[in-house]
């Protein structure tokens, strides 16, 4: 196997390593630097995904590392922006609660079946996209004031997609449990 196939993992690891810098710059009020770093993180996420798919450089570790890096960035950004009172604390709570609930469900499923399967759905991907757009918009707003309605709409969309995604995962988990109880069926 070629060592080239680990390039996406290296890009992802570098993205993960920059999360503390993002938090530092946000707390320090260096919003321009933070915004640039967020954009670079997004571009690196697209690049590592492209390389993994296009050149078939997918690895098991990359399948776990990439979403972990994304979640580390998002959760860190939400907690920091909440601590700075740039996002409502209740929103930070529901965003984190959703991720913790999904992770707990996945780990419980893994414990019961010895398989860990977290497949992002269209609603989940939409939720992540809206969450990222909200973070970028809030940081940009610190540099160039935007109309308040833009952030309010993005907060509403974040709540809506977070709730929809949470319900979807709950229904999926329930259907797995029902299927696993039926004789001759596997979840």
Image: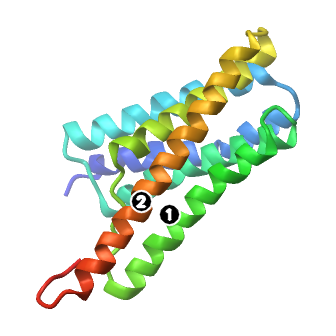
Residue 84's x, y, as percent? 87, 37
Quarter assignment of residue 149:
top right
Horizontal relation, residue 22 to residue 101: left or right: right
SS under mark 2: helix
As measured in the structure, the alpha-carbon distance from the residue carrying label 1 to the one carrying label 2 is: 7 Å
- Residue at horizontal 49 percent and vertical 40 percent from the top: 127
Mark carried by residue 46? none
Horizontal relation, residue 25 to residue 9: left or right: right
Horizontal relation, residue 1 to residue 33: left or right: left
Q: Please identify the quadrant where the N terminus is shown.
A: bottom left
SS under mark 1: helix
Is residue 116 shown above or below 183?
above
Q: Nearer the viewer, residue 73 or 18?
A: 73
- Mark 2: few, some, or many residues within 10 Å (few <14, many ≥20)? many
What residue is pinned by disc 2? 169
What residue is pinned by disc 1? 102
Q: Please identify the quadrant where the C terminus is shown.
A: bottom left
Residue 171's x, y, as percent? 38, 63
């Amino acid at each position: 196997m070629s060592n080239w196939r680990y390039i996406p993992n290296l890009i992802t690891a570098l993205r993960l390593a920059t999360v503390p810098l993002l938090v530092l710059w946000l707390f320090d009020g260096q919003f321009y630097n933070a915004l640039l770093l967020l954009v670079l993180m997004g571009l690196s996420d697209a690049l590592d995904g492209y390389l993994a798919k296009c050149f078939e450089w997918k690895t098991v570790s990359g399948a776990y590392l990439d979403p972990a890096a994304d979640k580390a960035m998002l959760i860190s950004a939400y907690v920091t922006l909440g601590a700075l009172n740039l996002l409502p604390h209740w929103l930070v709570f529901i965003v984190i609660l959703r991720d913790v609930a999904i992770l707990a469900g996945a780990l419980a499923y893994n414990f019961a079946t010895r398989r860990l399967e977290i497949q992002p759905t269209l609603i989940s991907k939409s939720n992540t996209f809206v969450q990222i757009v909200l973070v970028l918009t809030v940081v940009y707003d610190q540099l160039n004031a935007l109309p308040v309605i833009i952030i309010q709409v993005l907060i509403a969309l974040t709540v809506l997609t977070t709730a929809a995604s949470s319900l979807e995962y709950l229904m999926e988990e329930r259907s797995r449990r029902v299927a696993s109880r039926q004789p001759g069926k596997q979840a």
